[in-house]
Amino acid sequence: MRKFIDRVRPRLLILALAGTASCGWLAWAGNATVDASEEKAGGDTTVYEVGRNAFSFPAANLDEAGRTTFAIGNSFFRRNWVEAPSSTTARDGLGPHFLARSCGGCHVQDGRGAPPGTLKNGLSSEQPIALLFRLSVMGADGKPRPEPTYGQQFTVAAAQDVKPEGKLRIQYTEMPGRFADGTRYSLRKPTYTFTSLGYGPMAPKTMVSPRIAPQMIGMGLLEAIEEPDILRNAREQAARGDGIHGMPNRVFDVYAQREVIGRFGWKANAGSVAHQTAAAFNGDIGITSEHFPAEECMPKQTDCAAAPRGTSALLATSAPMASATTTPKSTPVEIDNATLEKVIAYTATLAVPARRNFNDLDVRRGQALFAQAQCAVCHQASYTTGESRFPALSRQKIHPYTDMLLHDMGPGLADGRPDEQANGKQWRTPPLWGIGLVPDVNDHSFLLHDGRARNTLEAILWHGGEAEASRQQVLKMKRDERDALVKFVNSL
């Protein structure tokens, strides 16, 4: 009975409004279609949860063994690592340089990070944890190389007797604007400055890319999207001829030991959940593993190189490398394969919450406006997953709202730093599922790759480049249309 009511309610509401609605509104309402499967954004893995823990549940269809693995992985994801040497050998090895003491330090409640708080004058007064900074310089061969003093990633914390790499200052400048109806808005543009540098100045022309920690839900489902579906998105966009032409990033995956399509990270620079997880342990917490067996201690960072290491496990053989450093036999690493695999499984099987207000009339109107503004070209709604090594994730109809491709987002969002095949203006289309629950989970609504947008509408207004035409359509919308559009996005 409930399903019948949900199915007919939109039509009943449309009829009730027929006496006062405009012809355009009636035309939209009469042509609207309702895909009931969209309510279950993650297919059979979907959980019906809201509130603080909405992003922290296992896939609804996980079996008992999967839930046990999930629980163990969760404990290693959330609990702090400690400096070596320590009696807690299963969790020692933090640093020498690091951003956070645990995965959950950046992804609080498996959710989205926020930039440091700001003072009234627009200056940041805190040091970032969930906002990291990639660094590089252009090599003689025209390819990016690690910054020679601070490496590939800037960190603000360090173990005992090791100098932190430095501090960060963020200053925001307000950029006012108006919608076509005269309503004012303002966007904030960040400027980043590195201060108190521990090992001397950075190289001239260092390229810097800020990256905020995104919510963790649905990663295993995104990994299970079949490669031909992603490539089809690129072909279909190229055939449109309207300036929207996404492209896949192609990256070397240390687990597959081959080049694959990039799927994770703000520039799609990781091809699998396993690679992304192990790389984050290494770069953000300083925890070594089989495929990432060395911390990044640059030549001037002698205190980093001399710091004690943890010995949670001992490799029997040399491992495939993510850097040029060679690793001898019997190299100690700080997280063993079995434990890391449980964290990977945890990350892959975090459930996607169901959509809220699925049949709300304004939400349906906002969905039509989303399509009309061509937002749905890049934020592709639906896929059916292929076979996954986690059976619960296989053959699921999912609704992530992403094409998994890179797009030129214009000079306003450009970081100027290439990443594999991504150029300095390109970013991966982020999935939109769960975006409306970020305020419940993380007590904020900061969006985009560096958290500069304070809400959904600001995030839309930052779109440029391939999305400039869509932005212009939004600028022309009336207030009630903008409200409906935001309400739709926040229902996902």
Image: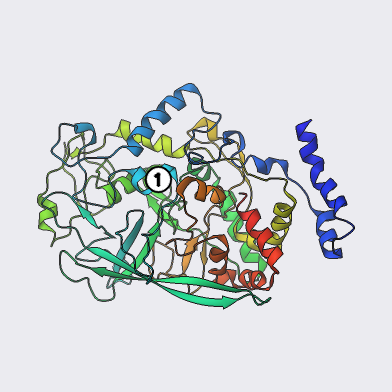
| Image quarter in which the N terminus is found | top right
Residue at the front extreme, as displayed: 120
Q: Image check: 373 left or right of 133? A: right
Quick one: SS at disc 1?
helix
Q: How is the image coloured?
A: rainbow
Q: Is residue 267 above or below residue 181?
A: above
Q: Residue 61 at what x, y percent from top left?
A: 56, 29
Q: Is residue 243 above or below residue 65?
A: below
> Is residue 316 among what the camera can see?
no
- Three-letter amino acid code of the residue under disc 1: Val
The residue sitting at 56% across, 60% down in the picture is: 456
Front-most of residues 413 and 333: 413
Q: Residue 454 at what x, y percent from top left?
A: 49, 62
> Mark 1 highlights which residue?
108
Q: Is residue 484 above or below residue 321?
A: below
Q: Is residue 413 above or below residue 282?
A: below
Q: Image check: 165 left or right of 465? A: left
The residue sitting at 71% across, 69% down in the picture is: 478
Which quarter of the figure has residue 354?
top right
Q: Residue 79 at what x, y percent from top left?
A: 31, 37
Residue at the right extreme, as displayed: 19
Q: Image check: 163 left or right of 259? A: left
Binning the other alpha carbons within 10 Å of mark 1 as few (below 14), some (14 to 19) or many (20 upward) gives many
Q: Residue 106 at what x, y percent from top left?
A: 36, 49
Front-most of residues 374 and 262: 374
Count of numbered tags: 1
The residue sitting at 46% across, 45% down in the picture is: 216
Front-most of residues 24 and 278: 24
> Is residue 401 among what the camera can see?
yes
Q: Image check: 443 left or right of 375? A: left
